[in-house]
Image (tube, rainbow, N blue to C red):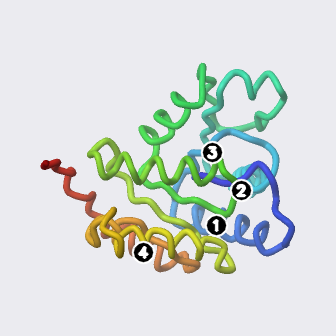
């Protein structure tokens, strides 16, 4: 799960994090996330824990040292840097979902999608499109297809939706993209 260390300026984002936490617990899905205790990250983790769900955090030492870690997780793995954090999160999770967030959230979900295209990530990649937050990004990926920088088949492997039922269906039926071949 990728989401912001900020809460956003509209209560709809916090409500979406609470709804997502309910959905995770109802579907017996554990939360694997960055380990933070603030913003949407903290809200999501607190809600899952309050419903007796399992929450696994992965956080670099530098953020632990700054007091960013959520206390009381099921487990918190402390790693040496952000690159290892992202890799470990992919290894421990069965899917990648991004809630609204800032540049870090975008970087993480886009890297997960890029790694899927390379064959290094078998997890489905989803942008939980709360209140149309990711609409401009969706248009950007559609433009990549239109301009010949992304295949339509690969584009279909990146899912945008505000419906948790549709997200579940996408993830349940997900088949990783074919490993990209290169030709000159």
Q: Residue 61's quadrant in the figure?
A: top right
| Mark 2 neighbour class, 10 Å CA radius: few under 14, some 14 to 19, many 20 or more | many
Looking at the image, is 86 positioned above or below residue 160? above
Horizontal arrangement in the rendering, residue 91 relative to residue 161 (left or right): left
Looking at the image, is 49 positioned above or below residue 69? below
User: First in sequence: mark 4 or mark 1?
Assistant: 1
User: Is there CB contact under 8 Å for labels 2 and 1?
Assistant: yes
For residue 142, which numbered disc appears in the image?
4
Q: Residue 8's quadrant in the figure?
A: bottom right
Looking at the image, is 173 positioned above or below residue 29? below
Alpha carbon separation for disc pair 3 and 2: 9 Å
Element type at marker 1? helix
Q: Residue at x 51, y 76 (%)?
A: 139
Discs 3/2, front? 2
Q: Residue at x 81, y 53 (%)?
A: 6
User: First in sequence: mark 2 or mark 1?
Assistant: 1
Discs 4/2, front? 4
Residue 94 or residue 139, whichever sits in front: 139
The residue tagged 3 is 55
Element type at marker 3? strand
Alpha carbon separation for disc pair 3 and 4: 34 Å
Residue 145 or residue 176, whichever sits in front: 145
Which percent across, then down, holds residue 72?
76, 36
Q: Residue at x 59, y 54 (%)?
A: 106
The residue tagged 2 is 44
Alpha carbon separation for disc pair 4 and 2: 30 Å
The residue tagged 1 is 20
């Amino acid at each position: 799960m990728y989401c912001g260390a900020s809460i956003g300026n509209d209560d709809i984002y916090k409500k979406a994090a609470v709804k997502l936490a309910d959905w995770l617990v109802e579907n017996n899905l554990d939360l694997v996330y960055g380990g933070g205790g603030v913003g949407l990250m903290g809200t999501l983790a607190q809600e899952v824990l309050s419903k007796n769900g399992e929450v696994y955090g992965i956080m670099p030492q530098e953020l632990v040292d700054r007091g960013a870690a959520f206390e009381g997780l099921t487990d918190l793995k402390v790693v040496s840097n952000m690159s290892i954090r992202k890799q470990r999160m992919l290894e421990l999770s069965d899917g990648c979902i991004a809630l609204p967030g800032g540049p870090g959230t975008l970087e993480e979900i886009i890297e997960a999608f890029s790694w899927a295209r390379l064959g290094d990530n078998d997890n489905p990649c989803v942008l939980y499109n709360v209140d149309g937050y990711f609409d401009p990004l969706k248009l950007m990926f559609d433009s990549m297809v239109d301009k010949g920088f992304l295949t339509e088949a690969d584009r279909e492997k990146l899912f945008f939706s505000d419906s948790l039922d549709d997200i579940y269906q996408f993830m349940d039926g997900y088949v990783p993209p074919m490993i990209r071949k290169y030709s000159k």
